[in-house]
Amino acid sequence: MIRVLSIILAALLSCYVLVVAFIFRDFKEDGLCEGLEIVLRDSLEKHFVTEGDLVYLLKQAKLYPVKTPMSEINTEKIEEKLLSNNMISKVEAYKTPSRIIKLEIEQKMPILRINSPAGNYYVDNLGSVMPLSRHYVAHVLVASGQIDEKLALGDLYKFALFLQEDDFWNDWIGQIYVDADNNVELIPRVGNHKVILGSFDDYLTKLENLRLFYEQAIPKVGWDKYSEINLKYKNQIVCIKR
């Protein structure tokens, strides 16, 4: 029985090799590129770049492959050029037997939008800056106020990443504001009040204290009782009545 299976597998492998050889017999490097196929893998969720943007970028760099001899097309240079677009996180460029250059593109994933006098941009999930898009506005956490790039890519990025991974806080916090003294304020989606976080130091403890406050105190007094909830003092919650 085992010998029969081995013979069958060997026959199937031989057929596979013949089929592959048949498919690739016309794949000659001296032919002209007959087309460009672009696949935006996550285009249903994000629309930061379009096929037109990518084609324009390649033409500007004289890397547009159509009607170019296949032997002269450098897919590594194409990948390198497209990755210079700060909206793109990954590019795979390769030649097909039908003389088509195929591009598979992954766009970056923003988790935070910065609106500040120092600049307006996104911070992605890997902690790098990506510009705003003329095509698409991502619905992500917004941080405004006195924010420089060091803060945006440091403590703010780490905080935003934590919020994204925590369902409760991701749903609850709608906006972050940083004042001139680097005090951090959180604007909730629920209730007409603001939360003073202070600095980002020990924010996990501060938020856990706030969670307990919401669970134990707010049901008794209501969401409109306070105009401000202050967490900046160690192990204390100071509230200002409306």
Image: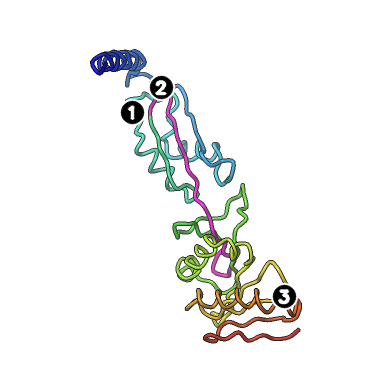
> Secondary structure under badge 3?
helix
Q: Which residue is mark 2?
A: 99
* Amino acid found under the numbered disc labelled 1: Glu
Q: Is residue 79 above or below residue 235?
A: above
Which of the numbered marks, if any, corresponds to residue 72? 1
Q: Main secondary structure of the magenta part?
A: strand
* Amino acid found under the numbered disc labelled 2: Arg
The C terminus - image quarter: bottom right
Q: Which residues are magenta?
A: 95-120
> Secondary structure under badge 1?
helix
* Amino acid found under the numbered disc labelled 3: Pro
**Gap in angstroms between the C-alphas marked 1 and 2:** 12 Å
Mark nearest the camera among 3 and 2 is 3
Q: Nearer the viewer, residue 53 or 90?
A: 90
Q: Quadrant of residue 187?
A: bottom right
Q: Quadrant of residue 186?
A: bottom right
